Amino acid sequence: MPKFDYFNLLSPIYDMVFAQRQEHELVDLLEIENCQTLLDVGGGTGRVSVLFKNTTKKIFIADTAINMLQLARDKGLATVVSESEHLPFPDQIFNRIIMVDTFHHVKDQRQSLDEMWRLLTPRGKMVIEEPDIQHLLVKLIALGERLLLMRSQFKKPQAIVEMCQFVPHSDVKLIRRKGFAWIIITKKEID
Ligand SMILES: C[S@@+](CC[C@H](N)C(=O)[O-])C[C@H]1O[C@@H](n2cnc3c(N)ncnc32)[C@H](O)[C@@H]1O
């Protein structure tokens, strides 16, 4: 029997409920230039990736929910059904990797970070955007997700920063604003 997936169920209304913010912070944080490759892990309907469609040579969305991915394909985006813990790509092929509102949903956060790091090119950049669990509204959302048995694992932004220290090759920054946190990880070139 196929495994129950909340996001397959939510997919028909997802883009209506989670509207795209006009001035998405990721656009500035990612510093996307032409001819770059972007992987959106847990990218769902492509709600965020679509922002980069005209400035990025190749975008892939990896997600476990096939109904979410169908909506991404309808937006002209390439998709792959995949868990973030096992991404089916060779090492060091993406200049930019994003994970938006997904980190708390993945089963194995450590393994997902290691996979994303493996795929990142030297001088590449990955950005994890998460609801900031230290914000009251986010605490209520986390409670709601717990009541719905969604098995979310919210981490404090600083704890995610600590998980992203791929010493000595990473440079990690944290930005927190209005209930959101952005963890920006750059892969330093190795001499
Ligand atoms: C809240 S949605 C966010 C979707 C998209 N990033 C956005 O901001 O619109 C979380 C997404 O993570 C996906 N997801 C959950 N666990 C995953 C995993 N282990 N690997 C890949 N995708 C996963 C879900 O299917 C869902 O599409």
Image (cartoon, helix red, strand yellow):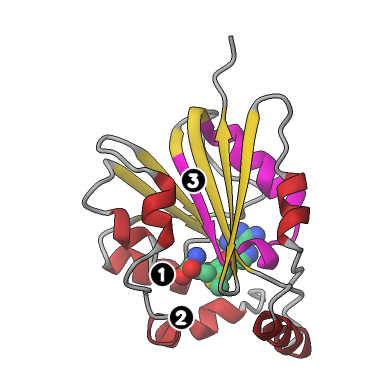
Q: In this view, does 97 lie above or below 95?
A: below
Residue that mark 1 sits on: 45
Q: Amino acid under label 2?
A: Ser
Q: Amino acid under label 1?
A: Thr
Q: In this view, does 7 lie above or below 48?
A: below
Q: Does the magenta stretch include residue 99?
A: yes
Q: Can residue 96 be seen from the camera position used here?
A: yes
- The picture places residue 98, in percent across and down from the top left corner, at 50, 52
Secondary element at image label 1: loop
Residue that mark 2 sits on: 11
Q: Which residue is drawn at 59% across and 15% down?
A: 190
Please state which of residues 76 and 53 is positioned toward the viewer in this rendering. Answer: 53
Image marks 1 and 2: residues in contact by CB distance under 8 Å: yes
Front position among marks 2 and 3: 3
Instruction: Tell me the quadrant of the picture where the N terminus can be found.
Output: bottom right
Secondary element at image label 3: strand
Q: Which residue is drawn at 43% across and 35% down?
A: 95
Q: In this view, does 178 lie to the left or right of 18?
A: right
